[in-house]
Image: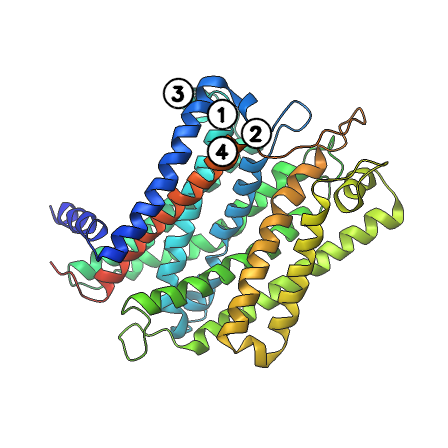
Amino acid sequence: MKFLQFVGASVRIALTGSKRYYAWLLACLTVTLVGFYYYLYQLEHGLIVTGMRDQVSWGSYIANFTFFVGVAAAAVMIVIPAYLYHVTDFKPVTLLGEMLAASALIMCICFVMIDMGRPDRVWHLLPVIGKPNFPVSLLCWDVIVLSGYLIINLFIPGYMLYSVYHHKEASKKILLPFTYLSVPWAVSIHTVTAFLYCGLVSRPVWNTALMAPRFLATAFAAGPALIIIIIQIVRRYTPYGSPGEKFEIPNETIYKIANIVVVALLISLFFTFSEVFTIFYSAGAHKASMAYLYFGFDGHPSLLTPYIWASLVMNVVAAVILLIPATRKNLITLNMACILLFIGIWIEKGMGTVLPAFIPSPLGEIWEYWPSNPEALITLGVWGLGALVFTMLAKIAIQIETGDVGR
């Protein structure tokens, strides 16, 4: 009965708010519904309506899936200081981080589902009723770690908010095991995703031991960068995190998160330069794909070249801004750096990682991939869904934590 009261209160909080709140929800819902409409169109006509073909069978959907797995994993960089090292400044931020992780995971699941030509056959991956081929199948491992991490990131904040709503203290015996479990699980979701790529020996550009470390480094830069932006939006439009409030998030906490971002970004850039040097200096099997990505190939201009170079420039500029204490501790320049690196890593980790493995094809064929209009709108629809879910989850958490809603 108490749980149903909590659920009812949560739904009521999520569906009530100011005119500005309703306008934002309507905008997110509109984008989501447009994407859903085009998904139904894709479902009717098949994946031929996308820019993908036999030569390039993974495109925008898997690129965004890969990126948002990293965003979800990045919540652990807030959880570790808060719960393992008891940095009290980080504890108000953990709630936002876990809500962001849950929203990102929902987006990941959506991207995988829409990339399937026959989503009705997903039951084959389910235990008991299907044949998931566990533990041999890496895809089965990915399903386990993603669904498990989603459950963890819904349970931890859900149980904490349930306890606050009913004016009782959360049991550490229940909470701490899940909190500690979330740390290795967060690393596992991106590691298993990287293994899906680097285990494919027929795609030389993916077949590198650096894939998993690179994925984690980019995740631990882009995710906390997004959290920095979210903190400031929340502080501006809600009492949560504002100066003088119970759950104050001071600028110093933001600067500490920025320290995490700059270290991860520098490691990511180092991995990128190491990979580029190794590929181009040794002229191994990777070179054809990477040459196509960065310079075009045998007279064929690459659609991706300007984007990958823009990504590299954005990441380097962001690193310089974050390395200088004066600009790192200035919210305007810090926000600029966070936006630049978020976009830069989205390009590099998405299209810059997925597509080069397919171009040129094993037969040496150059097939230029570019997302079709329906494909782009479906992708935007999932982004809209993610924003909608995060907004509602964050509103529930903020109002219960700040005491605006009681039993």
For residue 312, which quarter of the picture?
A: bottom right
Q: Are marks 3 and 1 in contact (CB under 8 Å)?
A: no
Contact, mark 3 vs mark 2 (Cβ under 8 Å): no
Q: Residue at x 27, y 62 (%)?
A: 398
Of marks 4 and 3, which one's residue comes earlier in the chain? Answer: 4
- Which sits earlier in the primary sequence, circle 2 or circle 4? 4
**What is the spatial separation of the Cα atoms under label 4 and label 1, in whole angstroms?**
16 Å
As measured in the structure, the alpha-carbon distance from the residue carrying label 2 to the one carrying label 4 is 16 Å
Cβ–Cβ below 8 Å for labels 4 and 3?
no
Q: Secondary structure at mark 1?
A: loop
Res. 271 visible in picture: yes
Q: Which residue is mark 1?
A: 132
| Image x and y of residue 165, in percent | 18, 59
Q: Is residue 212 above or below residue 144?
A: below
Graded by Cα atoms within 10 Å as few (under 14), some (14 to 19) or many (20 or more), the crowding at tag 4 reads some
> Could you tell me which quadrant the N terminus lies in?
top left
Q: Which residue is mark 3?
A: 129
How many angstroms separate mark 3 from mark 2 (CA)?
17 Å
Mark 4 and 1 residues: CB-CB less than 8 Å, in contact?
no
Q: Residue at x 61, y 36 (%)?
A: 196
Direction right: furthest residue: 282
Q: Amino acid at mark 1?
A: Pro
Image depth: mark 4 or mark 1 in front? 4
Q: Which residue is mark 4?
A: 112
* Dot placed on the residue nearer the N-terminal end, 1 or 2: 1
Instruction: Give the mark nearer the N terminus: 3 vs 2.
Output: 3
Which labelled disc corresponds to residue 137?
2
Residue 353 is tagged as none
Measure how far apart labels 3 and 1 are at the Cα level: 9 Å
Q: Which three-letter amino acid code belongs to the residue tagged 4?
A: Val
- Percent x, y of residue 39: 43, 28
Q: Which quadrant holds residue 372?
A: top right
